[in-house]
Image (cartoon, rainbow, N blue to C red):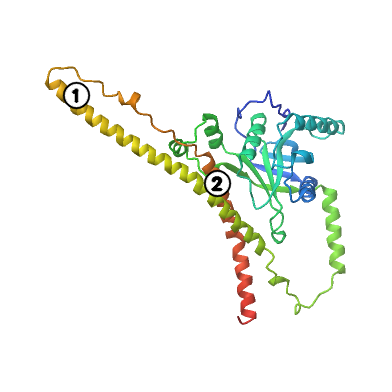
Amino acid sequence: MSKSYANPAPTQAPKFPTAPATTTEVEIDSSVVLKIIKAASDGFPSFVSGQLLGVDLENVLNVTHAFSYPASIKDNESAGIRSKSIVKYQNDILSHLKAVNVDVNTIGYFASTALGRYFHSTVIDNLLHLQAANPNAVFLLYDNAHPTESGISLKAYRLSEAFIQARKEGSFSTEYLQKVDLTYRNIFDELPVSIKNSHLVTLFLQTLEKKNASQTHPTSLASNFDKFDISIDSYLERNIEGIFNSIDGFHTDQGSYNWYQRQMAREKLKIKQWQHKRALENSARVASGKDPLPEDEWKTLFKLPEEPSRYDNLLISGQTDKFCSQIEDFGANVNTKLFATQKSLNI
């Protein structure tokens, strides 16, 4: 049985999800995929975002419709979905869709990106807002820069329970992250995605396949050099540039954390020296028949530095890992083509 959720209102929706998600996979109508790709292509090189509508049936989240946000709020990736102007725009669109019997249940939002850049606080805030109203809400990410040879890159993500709990506690200290076992690898839960065609569309595609098969003619392989086209070389190059930028951000954040550790070590050394001095002083006072002085007075004399939040470190580490994974996935294909070309040219 499908569940219906009201569209989230920025001033009334709870801040955090009140129940765990019940869906474990995402099924997208093919027309929705085409809308997302078209919106991303039309808006390129800017990032675009939009709203997802549908229902959840048992453990499957069905995405049946989508519409993109106005160009005025596309300047920043996925920004502005909780602003008054976009909420008004959503309500207007939803009222028109409802008039033609379209499912108007908000089940998430989509965004386009390049090189898998989604470890961003804006994405997390928007998704947390949607999951607060509907625990099954997801974030669909379409990668414009993904090589076409590997098919479209459409991923579905949801904030993990561990991350939501850490956000609710407001603690991203090293001790707490170790306690709940939260790392950059489990900020998001990735859900399997399948694309569904209607029966009429499937029949039409099969008709096209038969027609194309009867019209094709065998061609000579002697002049076919497409296999040696290193078309994803620029993709790898941009991933490497992304790693450099992420490493710069990581070093900046790590420098702040290292400064905290040095300050903490200095203060602890001062406290230890003070406690040793107070212990000697109390021993002398007790020997002379006087009352010992309080040994916890250091708490009012010394102030330990606050540990900086590890939130940014989580996001930077996650994005760096994403760049590395993409290089690992596509680097092997490029190396094979390079060595094959080198061998054929006797270099």
Q: Earlier in the sequence, mark 2 or mark 1?
A: 1
Which labelled disc corresponds to residue 71? Answer: none
Instruction: Report which residue position mark 1 lands on.
Output: 282
Horizontal and vertical percent for residue 6? Answer: 73, 27
In this view, 206 is above or below 137: below
Horizontal and vertical percent for residue 106? Answer: 73, 33
Camera-nearest residue between 215 and 70: 70
Q: Secondary structure at mark 1?
A: helix
Quarter containing the C terminus? bottom right
Query: Closer to us: mark 2 or mark 1?
Result: 1
Instruction: Report which residue position mark 2 lands on.
Output: 316
Q: CA distance from mark 2 to mark 1?
A: 50 Å
Pointer 2 local density, CA inside 10 Å: few below 14, some 14–19, many at least 20: many
Q: Quadrant of residue 204?
A: bottom right
Q: Quadrant of residue 103?
A: top right
Q: In the rendered view, does 330 fall on the left or right side of 272?
A: right
The three-letter amino acid code for the residue at tag 2 is: Ile
Q: Secondary structure at mark 2?
A: helix
The three-letter amino acid code for the residue at tag 1 is: Asn
Horizontal and vertical percent for residue 107? Answer: 71, 36
Horizontal and vertical percent for residue 346? Answer: 61, 82
Identified at 75% across, 80% down, the residue is 222
Pointer 1 local density, CA inside 10 Å: few below 14, some 14–19, many at least 20: some
Outermost residue on the bottom side: it is: 346
Q: Residue 66: tell me if it is visible.
A: no
Identified at 47% across, 42% down, the residue is 256
